[in-house]
Image (cartoon, rainbow, N blue to C red):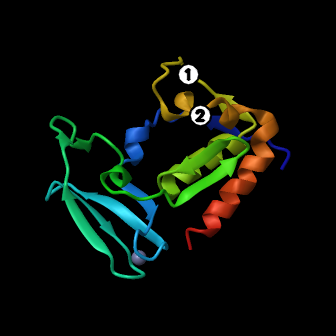
Amino acid sequence: MNQLNRFEDENLVMADFFNEVLVACPSCAKKAIAKVTFEAKKVRLFCLHCGHNKEVTAEFDKHRLLIKKPANQFFDVELWLKADFKNEQFWAYNDEHLNYLERYISATLRGHKERTHFTLLEKLPKFYHEAKNREALLKIIAKLKSKLG
Ligand SMILES: [Zn+2]
């Protein structure tokens, strides 16, 4: 791959990934999902492996129909997509979030518009941005992707 791999910040923010979060099932420890149902104004945790199913009422931002925190935080559960990296933790809410981080980390040219200190990428801890970490981070991403199955 000799071509320069360019990435532009799509100005996504963390909240763009709040509605659907992959978690470890509290019953069987396999992959489960915490997901918002807007019509019912609820957040539901369900597991296809063991049938674990729990639903709670969520508070929504009135204007934008958004929940105020990621779906996993309505339950006492661990994120499914996370891995230790040195003394830090690499994590993603869901496969879309993971793919977005992958595209950013694998890019050799990173486009930055005016900095707002607001987008998800701008808020990432320093280790995500360092070129020397690229290869190790991409390995972690590959490992996490294999857990998506
Ligand atoms: Zn389960």
Q: Residue at x 40, y 74 (%)?
A: 27
Disc 1 or 2, which lies upstream in sequence? 2
For the residue labelled by badge 1, is the local secondary structure a helix, a strand or a loop? loop
Seen from the viewer's position, the closer of residues 27 and 129 is: 27
Is residue 144 depicted above or below 62 in this figure? Answer: below
- Indicate the quadrant of ligand 1 in the picture: bottom left
Looking at the rendered structure, the number of numbered marks drawn on it comes to 2
> What x and y, as percent, mark residue 138?
72, 51
Seen from the viewer's position, the closer of residues 29 and 142 is: 29
Q: CA distance from mark 1 to mark 2?
A: 8 Å
> What x and y, as percent, mark residue 80?
51, 61
For the residue labelled by badge 2, is the local secondary structure a helix, a strand or a loop? strand
Asked whether the viewer can see residue 75, the reply is yes
Q: Residue 105: name its quadrant.
A: top right
Is residue 99 depicted above or below 50 in this figure? Answer: above
> What x and y, as percent, mark residue 40?
14, 59
Q: Are marks 1 and 2 in contact (CB under 8 Å)?
A: yes
Relative to 9, 62 lies left or right: left
Q: Which residue is mark 2?
A: 8
Q: Residue at x 48, y 19 (%)?
A: 116
Q: Residue at x 26, y 44 (%)?
A: 67
Q: Which residue is mark 1?
A: 113
